Amino acid sequence: QEESFLQHILSIAIVALMSTENETTSPAAGDDKTGNNAGSNQRSGNKNKNKQKKQNHQHNTAGSSFKGAIPELGAITIGDTPSQTNAYFVKVDRAIRNQIGREMHELSLKSLEGGELAKPEEYQAKMVDGSFENEMEKMKYEINYKENLRIEGLVKKELFQIFHIYIGQCSDQVKASLKEHADYEEMVTSKNVFLLRPMLKNLTVGFNETK
């Protein structure tokens, strides 16, 4: 159940990414098996264009593909109605946290609310002189270690999707205002929801008076 919402978000992301994948992998016009210069030149041009697209995408926080990923938010856009900007952020933030609590791993919500990645508890194996007490303790530790890696990977993936949901509910004006923040480059490059959420919270307070 905890992965059903993630699967829904990922299906949206896959559709959004397919067009970029096709541009990268489809044969260039004029190319043939003989490797003529026309095809080679066009492939080179396509690679340069795709490289530029990736660089642009790295700094693009539109997140439009994820807007409405939580049905109850619908057309709510943070910043479209200046006088309601903070109220809309509060509503979006509450809806996202509620959805995480229902559909995602409990550590994803703990991470979001704590402002840092929450990791699963490690198994405290019984040790004797720096070695496992017995083979059973070693096995328990190794099983727990592998499971913790799986959970940590899942939580990171969910936090990545949560980042895009927040951005997807922001107006262009709010996104433009985010660029003025000192940590914007780090936030958008790493898709760091721990930076984004407080930015939005601080930005939306008094948004009507400043914009």
Image (cartoon, helix red, strand yellow):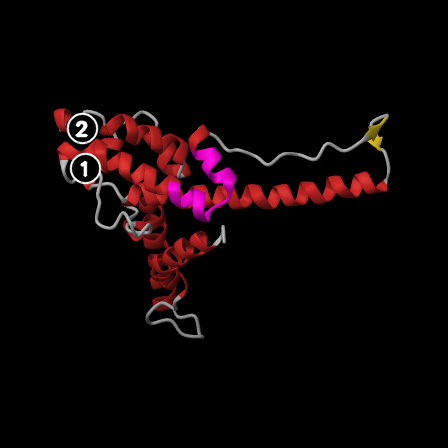
- Label 1 sits on what residue type? Gly
114 sits to left or right of 16:
right
Name the residue: 43% across, 70% down: 35
The reply to whether discs 1 and 2 touch (Cβ–Cβ < 8 Å) is yes
Label 1 vs label 2: CA separation? 8 Å
Q: Quadrant of residue 197?
A: top left
Judged by its main secondary structure, the magenta piece is helix
Crowding at mark 1 (Cα within 10 Å: few <14, some 14-19, many 20+)? many
The quarter of the picture where the C terminus appears is top left
For marks 1 and 2, the one nearer the N-term is: 1
Q: Position of residue 149 (x, y in %)?
A: 61, 42
Would you name the residue on which mark 1 appears? 79
Q: Residue furthest bottom?
A: 33
Crowding at mark 2 (Cα within 10 Å: few <14, some 14-19, many 20+)? some
- Label 2 sits on what residue type? Phe
Name the residue: 51% across, 38% down: 107
Q: Is residue 127 magenta?
A: no
The one of 171 and 18 positioned closer to us in this rendering:
171
Name the residue: 43% across, 34% down: 112
55 sits to left or right of 174:
right
156 sits to left or right of 168:
right
Magenta residues span 98-112
Q: Position of residue 173 (x, y in %)?
A: 18, 37
Q: Position of residue 26 (x, y in %)?
A: 39, 67
Count the labels in the image: 2
Secondary structure beneath dot 1 equals loop
Q: Is residue 60 visible?
A: no
Q: Is residue 111 magenta?
A: yes
Secondary structure beneath dot 2 equals helix
Would you name the residue on which mark 2 appears? 207
Q: Position of residue 100 (x, y in %)?
A: 42, 43
Q: Is residue 194 visible?
A: yes
